Image (spheres, rainbow, N blue to C red):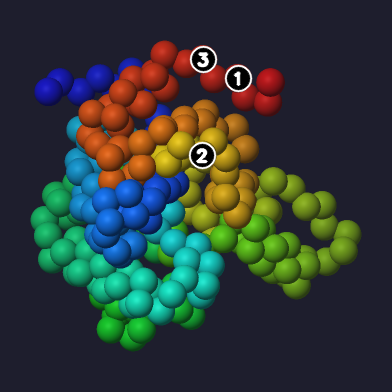
Amino acid sequence: MENNLENIPEHVAIIPDGNRRWARERGLEPWEGHEEGAKNIEKLIDVAIEKGVKCFSFWGSSMDNLTKRPMGEKVALLDIYKRYFKKVLEGKKIYENETKVNIIGHWEEQFPETLKKIIRELIEKTKHFEKKMLNFMLAYSGTDDMRFAIERIAGKYSSDVKITPEIIKTNLMTAALPPVDFMIRTGGEPHNSDGFLMWDSANSQLFFSPEMFPDFNEEKFRQALDEYAKRQRRFGG
């Protein structure tokens, strides 16, 4: 398929909602929905590469997902992360496409050492790549990100320093990420959650899909990107 690079968003962010509901509708365990969601992420990454998206972000879990969900679901979710990131680490795709992988959030406080070791190795092995960027928000909260940025700024700068947008951005967990051009939420609920990427999505185009995330397949993603290409962006208007 020939790439259409006209009006392709540089940074696409996805809130992959609906894994648990997808599983419940089929009489499955919640983690079976997360498993299907992980498989779907791989397919969507292929589409992003095909279409020329340079920066691709997924919200893998909030703090609540890891602290308030039943223990069985949390254990299963961590096992999915372990297997998925090990597959990414040992595969060829990120290296062939020179993709830098970022894991953003409080994952180091929440994950077991075996999983952290895999993630750290993945980050280390891809840190010099510059062609593309793949970001996973794990144990992440946008509201916490803003709060911690404010705390860091308060501790680093004197009271007479003018706080600029550049200073705020520099102190966010997402400091290395470009602004989000296109934010997609699946699951049929048209809203943001927990301030996901709130600073970086200030001027984003939004897309709400009725499909649960496991059903938001390659064709649905291409259709969303095609719709973005037809839109006219108005910054600040």
Q: Secondary structure at mark 3?
A: loop
Disc 1 to disc 3, C-alpha distance: 7 Å
Residue under numbered circle 2: 189
Residue under numbered circle 3: 232
> Where is residue 114 drawn, in percent x and y?
28, 84
Q: Quadrant of the C terminus?
A: top right
Q: Residue at x 88, y 59 (%)?
A: 160
* Three-letter code, disc 1: Arg
The answer to whether 113 appears left or right of 146 in the picture is left
Disc 3 to disc 2, C-alpha distance: 24 Å
* Three-letter code, disc 3: Gln
Return the residue found at the far bottom: 113
Task: Point out the frontmost of discs 3 and 2.
Answer: 2
Return the residue found at the far right: 160
Q: Residue at x 61, y 61 (%)?
A: 145
Name the quadrant containing residue 60.
bottom left
In the rendered view, would you say 187 is above or below 234?
Answer: below
Residue under numbered circle 1: 234
Q: Secondary structure at mark 2?
A: loop
Q: Reading the chain from its start, which is encountered first: label 2 or label 1?
A: 2
Circle 1/circle 3 CB separation < 8 Å: yes
* Three-letter code, disc 2: Glu
Q: Residue at x 30, y 38 (%)?
A: 216
Task: Point out the frontmost of discs 2 and 1.
Answer: 2
Q: Secondary structure at mark 1?
A: loop
> Where is residue 68 drawn, in percent x and y?
52, 72
In the rendered view, would you say 100 is above or below 10?
Answer: below
- Tell which of 207 and 2 is nearer to you: 207
In the rendered view, would you say 224 is above or below 16?
Answer: above
Please rate how many residues cluster around mark 2, counting C-alpha atoms within 10 Å: few if below 14, some from 14 to 19, many from 20.
some
Q: Reading the chain from its start, which is encountered first: label 3 or label 2?
A: 2
